[in-house]
Image (cartoon, rainbow, N blue to C red):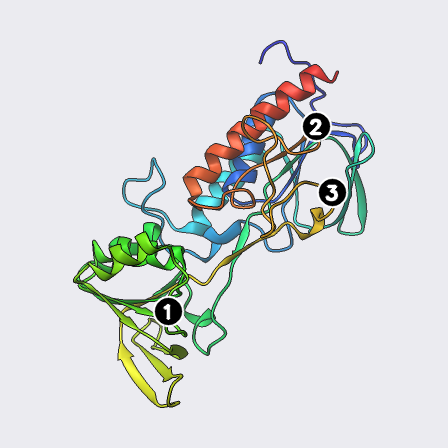
Amino acid sequence: MDKQTFSSKPNDPKGPWDTVIIGSGPAGLTAAIYTTRGAASTLILGGEVWGGQLMLTTTVDNFPGFSDGISGPVLMGKMKTQAERFGAQFQGVSVESVDLASKPFVVKAGGKTYLARSIIIATGASTTWLDAPGVKELIGKGVSSCAPCDAPFFRGKKVAVVGGGDSAMEEALVLAKHASEVTIIHRREEFRASAAMQEKVRSDPKIKILWNTEVVKVKGEGRVESLDLKNNSDNSISNLMVDGLFVAIGHKPDSGVFAGKLDMNDKGYIESRSEHCGTSIKGVFVAGDVIDKKFKQAVVAAGMGCIAAMEALEYLESDK
């Protein structure tokens, strides 16, 4: 990277910046660490609510380097500080529109216009949460959307999973390795999941299934303690004692501002159009959960952020 001679900082705060990073989760902040260390002037448009989904996580036990675990907000704060130490400029504003047809690219955010020689999109994806009382109040306090992240905290305990697709099956199978009992709650009388995934779930003695059932309330004083359930066949209400609730009814990639400007699949995930993180427009790169349809792990997002940054640096070098 020594041969690169990008500007250390644009003369005009509006740019053109060598790189504008949209998003401030693990992917975006890791990308900023690499672009700034690669001598590219870097602006992070982090959103009015910055830090991604880890800001809702109490303890992160599976991010390398923290043997005793670390809280999600603290981890994101450390990433942000590190990116800023290398020269990244951070603006806590949300992007309103982008123009990818012109060069430099035009990004409007917080009522201002910024110019960018390259863009890294790291806007993430949002969990689709249940619309039931107690759910959002207890996120990070027994309510989760990531079994690989949080299953070890429920060793020997009873948990429930809501959903009927492959993601719900995967959550239940991961949880069954730790919990004493896993209950899958599904509002219909059959799953949408693949036959192979259903067979794995049905053959696990720790997993039981409640059909035609919905969670109508999550109860607990500072922690999940039980669920009020409605039977959709007879509308009866029952209570299930659990220590945790895992919601697996979908994720929505935060890609709306790029609709019609970049290639996406039918669910809104931005498609890669290069070996790694390039998109359908040269000079625009993507990383993290806005492209990751499967793993949705902080360390995966961070790795993708690194790749996107290095590809952006290569592009900037060739586009001098």
Question: Mark on residue 190?
Answer: 1
In percent of the image, x 31 and y 52: which residue is there? Answer: 196
Please determine whether, in this image, residue 117 is positioned above or below residue 170. above
Q: Earlier in the sequence, mark 1 or mark 2?
A: 1
Q: Secondary structure at mark 3?
A: loop
Instruction: Tell whether 85 sits left or right of 98.
Output: left
Question: Mark on residue 118?
Answer: none
Q: Secondary structure at mark 2?
A: loop
How far apart marks 1 and 3 lie (CA) works out to 38 Å
Question: Residue under circle 3?
Answer: 261
Does residue 85 appear anywhere in the picture? no
Please determine whether, in this image, residue 316 is positioned above or below residue 175. above
Q: Quadrant of residue 197?
A: bottom left
Asked whether 207 or 152 is in front, the reply is 207
Q: Secondary structure at mark 1?
A: loop
Does residue 116 appear anywhere in the picture? yes
Identify residue type, mark 1. Answer: Glu
Please determine whether, in this image, residue 178 is positioned above or below residue 210. above
How far apart marks 2 and 3 lie (CA) works out to 12 Å
**Mark 2 Cα shell of 10 Å, populated few (<14), some (14-19), many (≥20):** some
Q: In front of the other: label 1 or label 2?
A: 1
Identify residue type, mark 3. Answer: Lys
Q: Earlier in the sequence, mark 1 or mark 3?
A: 1
Can you say which quadrant of the picture contains the C terminus? top right
Q: Quadrant of residue 172?
A: bottom left
Asked whether 309 or 160 is in front, the reply is 160
**Mark 1 Cα shell of 10 Å, populated few (<14), some (14-19), many (≥20):** few
Question: Residue under circle 2?
Answer: 282
